[in-house]
Amino acid sequence: MANRDNPDFLSEGTLKGSKVINKAGEDIGKIEKLMIDLIDGRIAYAVLSFGGILDRRDKLFAIPWQALKSEMHDHVFILDIPREALEKAEGFDKDNLSLTREELSGVYTYYGHQPYWQNIMAEQTELLGETEPERMILMRRAAGKKYPDFLPADTIKGEKVVSIAGEDIGKIEELVIDLQAGRVAYAVLSFDEFPGMSGKFFAIPWQALQVKFQEHAFLLNVPKYTLEKAEGFDKDHWPVTTYDWLSKVYSYYEYEPYWQTPRL
């Protein structure tokens, strides 16, 4: 798995368990999970356990991704939040990881960060005038739905993938994270149900996947003929992820690269 060749892009499996330190270099905990916003693939929040100088092992804590700075040459993340705020932070039970968007808004406010979806709505409204963009509509609808807004990345991995026609075609093997953007750069899928595609992995834009809660699956919005001609990679020899390489992947599947979309 090519994870350390470009430290700007790392797999979720590599990030999970990473040590977290404060600005003074003191050990304060580790990353337990990454919670993914199902609408756009952002890291809604990191779930941290606090040990070391904090010693709050009885709870887990939701932390905005913006508060974490990666120092991958040292294999750590620096958490830029004062110790006093962390000591007084309200944690949550280990069996109740998925916050609502409203609850998460309170978390962001407590740590002095504006919720990212409010930034998106404000910026897109400014860019598009009176037009309500699709992403804003989806976020507004999400507030009233019965399913969770966010899922742990490690539960997304392993989920089955179905085609537009409803056929089982594969599963999600891994999520590769863009550390700077704080979102899923691409999902790694296997398509063992397709002849000639077993033994390979395929990089798929997050936008091409749609969760189907009732079916415990993800719908892949890509035509079958496109998948059958897609260029995969060997399971033991992952490509080095760069924006140039990733741009070609997105273009092949006819999705706009997220880093080229204004301020998303």
Image (cartoon, rainbow, N blue to C red):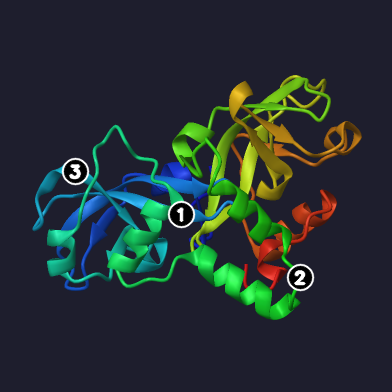
Give the answer, above or below, for where 13 lies relative to 250. above
Assess disc 2: are there few (<14), some (14-19) or many (≥20) residues with their C-alpha within 10 Å of its C-alpha.
few
Where residue 11 appears, as percent x and y from the top left, is 50, 47
Assess disc 1: are there few (<14), some (14-19) or many (≥20) residues with their C-alpha within 10 Å of its C-alpha.
many
Q: Earlier in the sequence, mark 3 or mark 2?
A: 3
Quadrant location of residue 231?
Answer: top right
Residue at figure coordinates x 58%, y 33% from the top left: 173
Residue at figure coordinates x 32%, y 73% from the top left: 112
Where residue 106 appears, as percent x and y from the top left, is 34, 60
Q: Is residue 238 left or right of residue 128?
A: left
C-alpha span from label 2 to label 1:
25 Å
**Front position among marks 2 and 1:** 2
C-alpha span from label 1 to label 3:
19 Å
Asked which secondary structure carries label 2, the reply is loop
Judging by the rendered image, the residue that carries numbered circle 2 is 131
Q: Earlier in the sequence, mark 1 or mark 3?
A: 1
Label 1 close to label 3 by CB (< 8 Å): no
Label 1 amino acid?
Ala
Judging by the rendered image, the residue that carries numbered circle 3 is 59
Label 2 close to label 1 by CB (< 8 Å): no
Q: Quadrant of the C terminus?
A: bottom right
One can see residue 200 in this view: yes
Where residue 123 appears, as percent x and y from the top left, is 62, 76
Judging by the rendered image, the residue that carries numbered circle 1 is 44
Asked which secondary structure carries label 1, the reply is strand
Where residue 142 appears, as percent x and y from the top left, is 57, 47
Residue at figure coordinates x 67%, y 74% from the top left: 125
